[in-house]
Amino acid sequence: MQVRIAHDAPAAVRAGALVVPVFSDGELTGAAKAVDAALGGAIADVLASGEIKGKPVELALVHAKDQPFRRVLVVGLGESGKLEAKALARYAGAAVRYLGRRNIGEIAIALPPQAAGHEAAFASCVAEGAIAGSFDTTAYQAKPEKKTAVDTVVILSDGFDAKAVETGMNRGVIVGESVNFARRLALTPANDMTPTILADEASRAARTFGLDVEIFDEPRIREEQMGSFLSVAQGSAQPPKFIVLRYNGDPGSKELLALVGKGITFDTGGISLKPPDRMEEMKYDMSGGAGMIAAMSAIARLRPKLNVVGLIPATENMPGGKATKPGDIVKAMNGTTIEVINTDAEGRLILADALCYANKLGATKIVDAATLTGACVIALGHAASAVVTNDDAFVKQFLAAADATGERYWHMPLYDDYTSAMKSDIADLKNTGGRPAGTLTAGAFLKTFVGETPWIHLDIAGTAYLDGESAWQAKGPTGTPVRALVAFVESLAKS
Ligand code: BES
Ligand code: MN
Ligand code: ZN
């Protein structure tokens, strides 16, 4: 999909449809007011009729015979005084999905008056949301039903700072495309998204966008003594890969941010086999890794002044004849021994070695993302990702950056109690801490591998993919945490 800027007045724009915002309070403003005048009060009529009230992502289509724009899609943005830029992603996404299903190819999107003075932020969200709304889930279908016809989106800059609109739009295109890249990797079934294919995708992105890439195969992983990672991989016929992506945006600095993502391309549970109900969703268990590959791609394109390394341990978790058995004791890269109580708690086993490797590279900050625990879905549902940390100031900066993106994160505690729950009788650690606070005992396990390095762990088990579609988003993978990571990296580069 192409996103560009146009300077036409809204009522004069040539398009298959013109998208204008309305609010649940007050009079028509901005583009809605101008277009309403051109149509003899047709938009005011829609609101007066009560067909929509202007609440967020309420939609009404008005045909505009004889106008250069052929239709107007009126989209609610809620209370005018409470509008934030991030609402514009849903506004644009809902418009693209609604019009795209009605075979409309080119649409023009108006900004609300509140964008004045914040043009870059608003335009970024419009571009990102429009591209995310066009995400294609039909690659495997002979006769796709849900394909979007929208191939061109024009953002109208009339009345705004056009330069800032363009800057924001360019950023939003990169974020939206990166979000869809992560979603495509996650949506692709595990037979077509093996560790080898995931590594190939990472290499291709690195080549395209200018990142350094190294793929460790099994002998190299063994050389690094990543025994915890290998203990998960040994049950699978697919060879594991350890993906390393590097972006050197500040060569003079010793600061290095590591982005570590769980890359389980399929999680059967291993010998502690999962029940069959919804096991197919475990193709999404590489969402953290996909998010980090996509975030690294976005970083390469946005070029912030910062050094970043992406680390993605990638393997299947299978119950093959060589698989790790409950009770086995394995050794992580830093020498820590781990008693594997439950082979389904595999994410923390592969992340343990990746976190050790981040420290070996000299990371000064670490963020990891993983679909780590079912307990996270019990605690927060699909409404937010859980965050734990060893550094409260670091998490504060992350939460501030993430807030502007529409992705939601909730900071949870890491009391020593949770670390104690991970003590083994005969090894240094065990890999499960019982049913209570499963997200936090998993976090406490990871914490023991990061040492003193400021670190944030994101449990995205409830947010990486969704069971249903919404007005602005297809069913399936969401692209979480790409938006938040990009915003966070930008904020780190500025501080
Ligand atoms: N990948 C799962 C976690 C998961 C569950 C993600 C549901 C998304 C939806 C993870 O590897 C896992 O199986 N965790 C276990 C840990 C337990 C054995 C301590 C879990 O949550 O049941
Ligand atoms: Mn598991
Ligand atoms: Zn898993």
Image (cartoon, grey):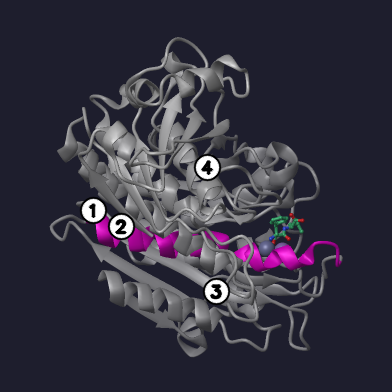
Q: Position of residue 1 (x, y in %)?
A: 38, 60
Q: Is residue 487 positioned above or below 332 on the image?
A: above
Residue for badge 3: 314
Q: Amino acid at mark 4?
A: Ala
Amino acid under label 3? Ala
Given residues 321 and 147, the one toward you in this image is: 147
Earlier sequence position, callout 4 versus callout 3: 4
- Give the total of numbered labels: 4
Q: Report the image quarter containing ligand 1.
A: bottom right
Image spot of residue 177 (x, y percent): 39, 58
Decide which of tag 1 and tag 3 comes sooner along the chain: 1
- In the rendered structure, find residue 472 and report the number of the disc placed on it: none
Which residue is at the far front?
66
Magenta range: 276-303
Circle 3 packing at 10 Å, graded few (<14), some (14-19), many (20+), is many
Closer to the camera in the image, 257 or 12:
12
